[in-house]
């Protein structure tokens, strides 16, 4: 069963991540982990290795291309996907703002390291390499693996949760979970991992570009920037209103993309059973390796947050 391979692959990722954390000092002796390109390649390799291994151990009747979703889209669909990426950005902004009521902004804290690099290096690392690897893994390997076994909405939400916990901090996990759901829906609508890659790439590129532009016009702006939670609280209602409109627009664009790619019925299958109030997924995708992985990752996130507050 594909979902068992997926969950074992996720546990393998966690083991590799633990090894990386424990040996980070040794890594730093030989490579400059402050370099965006190097640090991205090191971090993303721990995510990429398990799916590659388990994909070769999976169903032989399907090619890796089919099981990951390396399918070309119509040019018109690509245009819809770009519009969809822009539409869902306010949803991520809302989730980020809500998370900052309790935890610090992780990207803001690491802005100094990022700005030490050339803008094009940061853009390639964060807006191209990282999105490609993560979409290959979490929409191609994880989500599609669950769908091959017949999972429906559970595949959407569980793949988003696994994607969120992969970031290993509560701030990024909050908005990664929300946009992970959005990425899964556009992947389902198009059947192509390139659709979620485009969305992910544009989402990350926006952050990188805004950061470098702000630092260019206001040098050192991130050095003394602090989070004002009262201001964030005041802005959240506006973010929420914009996010509601974004969701409506996003749903319409998902529908259009599915029609263009001939996957309208496939998309409807996700919600089959809701009309009669008797929704039940076709397969239970939660297994012991997945539970162990999520519990350990959550514990690590809690411990990290406690240590940061004490310091």
Image (tube, rainbow, N blue to C red):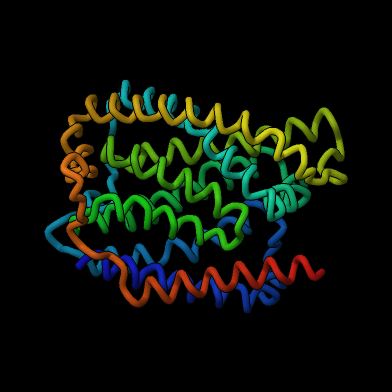
Q: Residue furthest left?
A: 61
For the point 64% across and 36% down, the residue is 236
Question: Horizontally, is 195 left or right of 2 in the view?
Answer: right
Of the pair 61 and 234, the residue shown nearer to us: 234
Vertically, is 119 above or below 1?
A: above
Q: Position of residue 252 (x, y in %)?
A: 34, 25
Of the pair 89 and 99, the residue shown nearer to us: 99
For the point 23% across and 44% down, the residue is 270
Q: Position of residue 45 (x, y in %)?
A: 49, 62
The image quadrant where one finds the N terminus is bottom left
Question: Horizontally, is 7 left or right of 296 in the view?
Answer: left
Vertically, is 71 above or below 306?
A: above
Question: Horizontally, is 224 left or right of 100 in the view?
Answer: right
Of the pair 190 and 275, the residue shown nearer to us: 275
Vertically, is 292 above or below 111?
A: below
The image quadrant where one finds the C terminus is bottom right
For the point 24% across and 65% down, the residue is 284
* Quarter-of-image position of residue 208: top right
């Amino acid at each position: 069963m594909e979902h068992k391979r997926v969950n074992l692959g996720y546990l393998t990722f966690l083991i590799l991540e633990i090894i990386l954390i424990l040996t980070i000092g040794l890594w730093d002796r030989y490579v400059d982990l402050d370099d965006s390109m190097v640090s991205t390649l090191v971090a993303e390799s721990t995510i990429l290795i398990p799916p590659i291994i388990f994909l070769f151990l999976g169903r032989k009747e399907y090619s890796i291309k089919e099981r990951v979703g390396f399918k070309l889209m119509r040019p018109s669909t690509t245009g819809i996907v770009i519009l969809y990426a822009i539409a869902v950005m306010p949803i991520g902004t809302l989730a980020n703002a809500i998370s900052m009521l309790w935890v610090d902004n992780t990207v803001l804290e690491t802005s100094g390291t990022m700005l030490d690099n050339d803008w094009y290096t940061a853009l390639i690392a964060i807006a191209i390499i990282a999105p490609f690897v993560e979409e290959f893994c979490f929409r191609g390997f994880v989500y599609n693996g669950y769908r091959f076994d017949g999972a429906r909405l559970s595949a959407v939400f569980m793949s988003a949760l696994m994607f969120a916990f992969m970031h290993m901090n509560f701030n990024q996990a909050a908005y990664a979970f929300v946009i992970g759901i959005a990425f899964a829906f556009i992947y389902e609508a198009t059947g192509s991992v390139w659709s979620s890659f485009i969305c992910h790439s544009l989402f990350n590129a926006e952050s990188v570009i805004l950061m470098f532009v702000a630092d260019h016009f206001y040098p050192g702006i991130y050095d003394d920037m602090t989070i004002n939670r009262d201001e964030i609280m005041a802005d959240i209602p506006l973010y929420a209103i914009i996010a509601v409109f974004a969701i409506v627009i996003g749903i319409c664009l998902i529908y259009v993309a599915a029609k263009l790619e001939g996957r309208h019925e496939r998309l409807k299958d996700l919600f089959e059973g809701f009309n009669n109030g008797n929704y039940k997924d076709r397969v239970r995708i939660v297994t012991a390796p997945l539970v162990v992985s999520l519990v350990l990752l959550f514990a690590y996130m809690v411990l990290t947050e406690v240590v940061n507050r004490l310091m």
